[in-house]
Amino acid sequence: MTYELKLLTGNANRPLAEEIAQYLRVPLCDAEVSRFSDGEVYVQINENVRGADVFVIQPTCPPVNDTLMELLIMIDALKRASAHRITAVLPYYGYARQDRKVQPRVPITAKLVADLLEAAGINRVLALDLHAGQIQGFFKVPVDHLFAGPVVMIDYLRKKELHDPVIVAPDAGGVERARAIAKRFNAGLAIIDKRREGPNQAAAMHLIGEVKGRDAVVIDDMVDTAGTLIQAVSALAREGARRILACGVHAVLSGPALERIAASPLEEVVVTNSIPVSAAKRAARVTVLSVAPLLGEAIRRIHDEESVSTLFV
């Protein structure tokens, strides 16, 4: 039996959802996602979703508490409307940075969000560039984990005519991601030894690898305050890198991020539209690539019960 494919989105990143719908040639569900006068989220799905295969496209990006609650309430509405299967499509997974206890008396919010999504009623998750791969294991339902770098960013970087390129991991946690792109790009690999001094504070200590006279590309999963990125860029410039570019899938760009990027020797910061990027942010040496074809193709394959891993293997 073939179940009807339906797409639902909230207010977090409607332009991306519309791009995905256009790719799949499937209209977005007619739904109202608004607020009561006291700020509570109101959801009303205005069409029949009984027995449908529904994909809820919602990055839990800033304002993260609002977008997360929208997602949970949309899932609950679909469950109570008897949808056959509910897949949470998470272009950006908020609260992912706290994925383990690194000091006493702190939460593991990545697991808490997974528990909330399962309690709301999801049957599956489609995520893009999770902050840590182990987050997949926080779910009891199947998780498809996509990577924008090998599919979206490598093609763009190949057009930059890089001289003797080296891919740089800004910290030890990003080595696997950087190594995968370096292998596909046939480039060298360098690693920044970074030690955190507190939340949103980072200090680059040592550079492992040779970057002198080479074009360096820093690869990370997100650019938030750009503290980690600028520390890495400073280390690369100090060691004589010829050109310095950066790729970060999720453009959080909060606090002093844009000012730090503007004052740095960075030539360009390449991000995706997993999170909405305003025109003002795009003007600050930020290039935005679309992940709609990648997510759209993954949704089609999940719906048709085809392999998703072939998208990036």
Image (cartoon, rainbow, N blue to C red):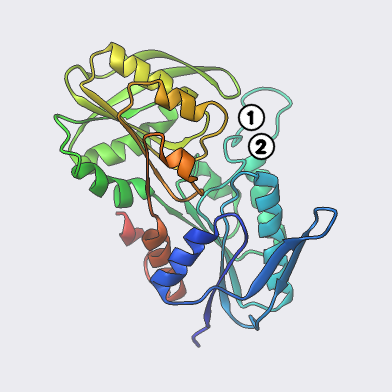
Badge 2 crowding class, 10 Å Cα cut-off, few under 14, some 14 to 19, many 20 or more, is: some
**Where in the figure is residue 213, as x and y percent of width and height?**
16, 19
Q: How many marks?
A: 2
Q: Quadrant of residue 182?
A: top left
Q: Nearer the viewer, residue 243 or 249?
A: 243
Going 32% across and 59% down the picture, which residue do you hit?
Answer: 311
Q: Nearer the viewer, residue 76 or 310?
A: 76
Q: Quadrant of residue 62?
A: top right
The disc placed on residue 101 is 1
Residue 178, compared with residue 113, is above or below; it is above
Tag 1 secondary structure: loop
At label 2, the amino acid type is Ile
**Where in the figure is residue 129, as x and y percent of width and height?**
45, 46
Q: Does residue 307 show up?
A: yes
Marks 2 and 1 close (CB-CB < 8 Å)? yes
Left-right relation of 104 to 135:
right
Tag 2 secondary structure: loop
Left-right relation of 217 to 263:
left
Q: Nearer the viewer, residue 50 or 258?
A: 258
Q: Does residue 171 show up?
A: no
Going 24% across and 42% down the picture, which residue do you hit?
Answer: 157
The disc placed on residue 165 is none
Left-right relation of 267 to 272:
left
The residue singled out by tag 2 in the image is 108
